[in-house]
Image (cartoon, rainbow, N blue to C red):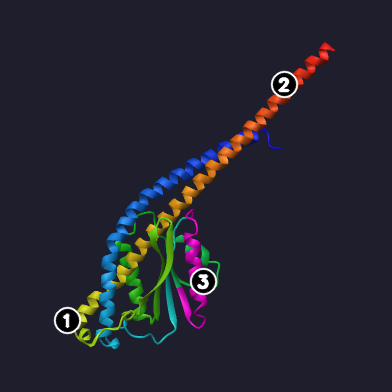
Amino acid sequence: MASLRDIKKRIKSVKNTHQITKAMKMVSAAKLRRAQADILAARPYADKIQGLISSLSANIPVETHPFFATPETNNVVLILITSDRGLCGSFNANLLRTAEGFIEERPDSEISLDLIGRRGVEYFKRRPVKVAGSRPLGSKRPDYGFASTIAREVIASHTRNGTGEVYLLYSVFRSALSQRPVTQKLLPVPPPEKKLKAAEKGAYTFEPSEEEVIETLLPKYVEIQIFRALLESAASEHGARMTSMDSASRNAADMIDYLTLRYNRARQTAITKELMEIIGGAEALKG
């Protein structure tokens, strides 16, 4: 049976853990508010430009640009966005499981990974999967410059090196309690989900020219979609970490109550034993 000293040391240890998890929850809650505001502001623009590019793909010949053309190779690039740190529940595990499923579903494709976030790098460096590139997220809020750098590399690889399809895998933020991994086809640009009517198919007039408009819009489209994925992932990570630390704090509080009860009972037992020994000694002296 644990001694009073052992129980007291354990209570102190759990209290220290409780302070840490409570502080981490508060930090994640503050970061979540900012990340949630960022993604709510970015979603309408990202959705609009995605719809515009999809509509363009139905209005122009696919041979006009490699972003629209069906690839002739079976090379597939998966851009996976995880976090740099842990302690965020099943956030990273769900993403990594989805990535494994993506690879298993394409046995005939030559898949290479572009990993964003240290957790994904640590996971796949021990597995027989080709990693084309990797980079950490960093501790700062996602910025457009970071997304632009990734987009330039993706575009260069797709247009010069003969890369086939490019997919984004990230976690979509729904709430602090709900984050869902999604796989989004980035290139070639997917056609619109709804078929356009005949009147809509010739509705675009390009100024100054079709080529210039496309050359300007398509890189912007890739940048915006990657930036959105980074913002969604950041909000999801903070929400998952806040929820996880809240659960850990409650569990620590329950453990402190349990250990305190054990300590009081053990202390009461020790006091009762001492009293019985004193009484027994006094009775022996009387006899």
Q: Name the residue under label 2.
A: 275
The residue that appears at 20% across and 79% down in the rendered structure is 212
Asked if the stretch drawn in magenta spans residue 102, the answer is: yes
Instruction: Identify the amino acid type marked 3.
Output: Glu
Residue 91 position in % (x across, y down): 47, 60
Q: Is mark 1 on a helix, strand or loop?
A: loop
Within 10 Å of the Cα at label 1, are there few (<14), some (14-19), or many (20+) other Cα atoms?
A: few
Q: In which quarter of the image is the C terminus?
A: top right
Q: x%, y% of residue 41?
A: 27, 60
Q: What label does residue 100 carry, if any?
A: 3
Question: Can I make out residue 218 in this image?
Answer: no
Q: Quadrant of the N terminus?
A: top right
Residue at position x 39%, y 54% in the image: 139
Q: Is residue 16 above or below residue 139?
A: above
Of the image marks 3 and 2, the number of the one nearer the N terminus? 3
Depth-wise, is mark 3 or mark 2 nearer the camera? 2
